[in-house]
């Protein structure tokens, strides 16, 4: 039988408190020398998604609805069918959150939208409409909102399919959904009305009970398009605006700004084309005439285009200089008289390669050019 080796504990030497303090100070000093960690320009706002979505958009919004008298039946034993509201286009957004920030803290791009919940299928009915969108809304002084931009279409899971429930969180990535500081990001659906099965539209189970929170909603067939102004005075028993107290839209936004947001959105820099200099000086070969004049080519991108062009050599020696006022977005040939010294250099070597520098709007652009006597 092979015996395992015996492990012997070894006593460690004691370290004095003074030495420990000195080591701590040294480590702190080294940490100060390290470059600061880069800060990601990403924030989140909206619902914290801490509870399940137990309420839906068809039966749990605070519209008065309407009762319809029908012959008694198993579906309507009392002879009354209640329609909660029109099963039409709807937009919902968190106006107030008991825990969280309802409005965007900065201007940027909604990189991701996380939505908790699913679409409830009707018993013995067709599958529910699953197509949804997200929208950016700007609050209005009267308490309403303006719809600015709508995302591409997404699909919400169907409750029960693949285990989806009111606790299922789906994350979507809109394309170029720009958001301004103070805006809402809203849930947008198309109603999905089917007579009897989805009389008040599809039951999108995306709301939770949250005393202290308030979700606003607006329902109108064809009334949730970009540019729509939503007024809190536009109300009826079956559509229009309603403030749903104690209810929270289970929606959370991951917001990108700066280098984490597309340059297409205000406040974003990602993917931005390089900033071009106000003037372009291209490589060129220019002839010198009998009057020691060279006509150098310049292309200006700004207006007005007022500046100075200088031809210099080794050690910064100036061989020619001239101010200019150029027409923007057009190549101009600026005549500059060069010194006799540079002409002699060209004659001796057949060519000279001085530096042409153009300065416009505080920016300098330099380029080596070839000068010859033709």
Image (spheres, rainbow, N blue to C red):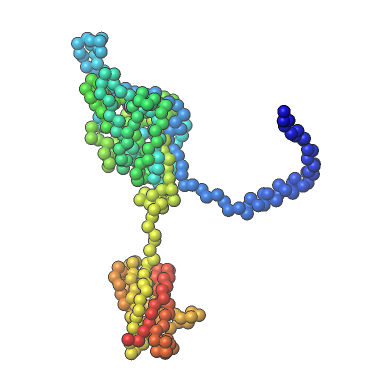
Q: Position of residue 67 (x, y in %)?
A: 24, 17
Going by the image, does 299 lie left or right of 253? left
- Does residue 279 lie above or below 226 as drawn? below
Which sits in the foreground, 131 or 245? 131
Q: Nearer the viewer, residue 108 or 261?
A: 261
Which residue is painted at 38% across and 82% down in the image? 371
Q: Quadrant of residue 331?
A: bottom left
Query: What residue lies at 39% left-to-right and 77% top-to-bottom?
Result: 369
> Which of 57 and 219 lies nearest the eye of the viewer?
57
**Quarter in which the C terminus is drawn:** bottom left
Residue 152 location (% of width, % of height): 30, 40
Q: At which x and y percent is residue 38?
A: 52, 50
Q: Is residue 236 above or below residue 276?
A: above
Looking at the image, which residue is at 50% across and 80% down? 315
| 38 displayed left or right of 123 | right
Q: Is residue 80 above or below residue 26?
A: above
| Total numbered circles | 0
Query: Could you tell me if residue 62 is visible in this image?
Result: no
Give the image location of residue 231, x and y in percent. 29, 35
Residue situated in front as seen by the camera: 231 or 218? 218
User: Looking at the rendering, in which quadrant would you find the N terminus?
Assistant: top right
Q: Is residue 68 left or right of residue 32?
A: left
Which quarter of the picture shows residue 33? bottom right
Whether residue 22 is visible to the viewer of this picture, yes or no, is: yes
Residue in view at x 23 percent, y 35 percent: 222
Left or right of residue 37: residue 225: left
Q: Is residue 86 above or below residue 172?
A: above
The single residue placed furthest to the left in the displayed view is 71
């Amino acid at each position: 039988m092979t015996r395992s080796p015996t492990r012997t504990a070894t006593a460690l030497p004691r370290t004095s408190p003074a030495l420990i303090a000195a080591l701590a100070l040294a480590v702190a000093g080294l940490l100060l020398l390290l470059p600061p960690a880069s800060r990601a320009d990403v924030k989140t706002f909206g619902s914290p998604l801490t509870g399940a979505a137990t309420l839906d958009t068809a039966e749990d919004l605070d519209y008065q609805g309407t009762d319809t008298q029908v012959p008694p039946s198993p579906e309507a034993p009392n002879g009354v069918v209640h329609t909660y509201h029109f099963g039409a286009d709807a937009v919902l957004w968190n106006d107030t959150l008991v825990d969280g920030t309802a409005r965007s803290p900065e201007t940027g791009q909604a990189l991701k939208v996380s939505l908790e919940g699913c679409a409830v299928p009707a018993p013995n009915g067709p599958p529910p409409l699953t197509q949804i969108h997200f929208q950016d809304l700007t609050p209005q002084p009267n308490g309403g909102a303006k719809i600015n931009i709508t995302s591409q279409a997404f699909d919400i899971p169907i409750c029960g399919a693949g285990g989806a429930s009111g606790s299922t969180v789906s994350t979507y990535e809109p394309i170029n959904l720009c958001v301004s500081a103070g805006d809402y990001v809203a849930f947008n659906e198309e109603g999905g009305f089917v007579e009897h099965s989805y009389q008040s539209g599809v039951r999108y189970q995306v709301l939770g009970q949250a005393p202290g929170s308030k979700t606003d909603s607006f329902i109108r067939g064809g009334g949730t398009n970009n540019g729509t102004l939503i007024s809190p005075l536009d109300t009826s028993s079956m559509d229009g605006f309603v403030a749903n107290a104690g209810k929270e839209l289970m929606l959370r936004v991951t917001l990108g700004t700066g280098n984490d947001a597309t340059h297409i959105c205000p406040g974003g820099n990602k993917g931005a084309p390089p900033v071009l200099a106000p003037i372009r000086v291209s490589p060129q070969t220019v002839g010198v005439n009998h009057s020691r004049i060279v006509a150098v080519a310049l292309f200006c991108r700004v207006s007005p285009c007022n500046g100075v062009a200088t031809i210099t050599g080794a050690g910064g020696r100036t061989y020619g200089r001239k101010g200019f006022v150029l027409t923007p977005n057009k190549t101009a040939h600026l005549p500059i008289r060069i010194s006799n010294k540079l002409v002699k250099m060209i004659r001796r070597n057949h060519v000279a390669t001085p530096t042409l520098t153009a300065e416009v709007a505080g920016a300098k652009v330099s380029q080596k050019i070839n000068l010859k006597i033709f």
